[in-house]
Amino acid sequence: MLRSLGSPEYYYSDLDALKLSLIDKASENARERIEIVANNAGAKVGKLKNSNLGVFQITAKNSGTGSYSYDGAFDNTSRYKTATITVRLEYDLK
């Protein structure tokens, strides 16, 4: 008798550390980008007024944005994955 076990599933085992790392990198990147914009506008970056975290996604590597979801995505069919999170930071400009 032949039994089908289905496809293997692949999980990332340290999601908390991954999320914190992504938030750290995204926050640094946002600060660098706002400093460029402010500098080009002749302004200076002030205090952080507001911040929001968006949806955390784990998708198949090189899958594009078609597999993204408003509620988040967690791909377990692909061995190689891409993780993303959206960080929105709002600064005062002087």
Image (cartoon, rainbow, N blue to C red):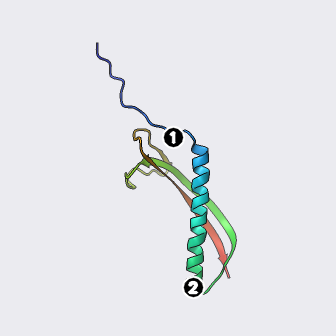
Residue named by callout 1? 12
Task: Indicate the amino acid at tag 1.
Answer: Tyr
Q: What is the quadrant of the C terminus in the image?
A: bottom right
Q: Residues within 10 Å of mark 1 (few under 14, many from 20)?
A: some
| Disc 1/disc 2 C-alpha distance (Å) | 42 Å
Specify the farthest residue to the left.
1
As drawn, the label of residue 78 is none
Q: Is residue 50 left or right of residue 58?
A: right
Residue 57 in the image, given as x and y percentages of width and height? 49, 50
Tell which tag, 1 or 2, sits nearer the viewer. Answer: 1
Q: Secondary structure at mark 1?
A: loop
Which residue is outermost to the right?
Answer: 47
Q: Quadrant of residue 45?
A: bottom right
Residue at coordinates 56% horizontally, 66% vertically from top-left?
A: 29
Q: Which residue is mark 2?
A: 41
**Local secondary structure at mark 2:** loop
- Give the vertical position of 35 relative to 1 (above or below): below
In-front residue for pair 92/58 = 58
- Closer to the chain start, of discs 1 and 2, is 1
What's the residue at 65%, 72% (across, down)?
91
Q: Which amino acid lies under the numbered mark 2 shown in the image of this protein?
A: Ala
- Report the quarter where the N terminus lies: top left
Residue pictured at 56% horizontal, 56% vertical? 54
Frontmost residue, 69 versus 26: 26
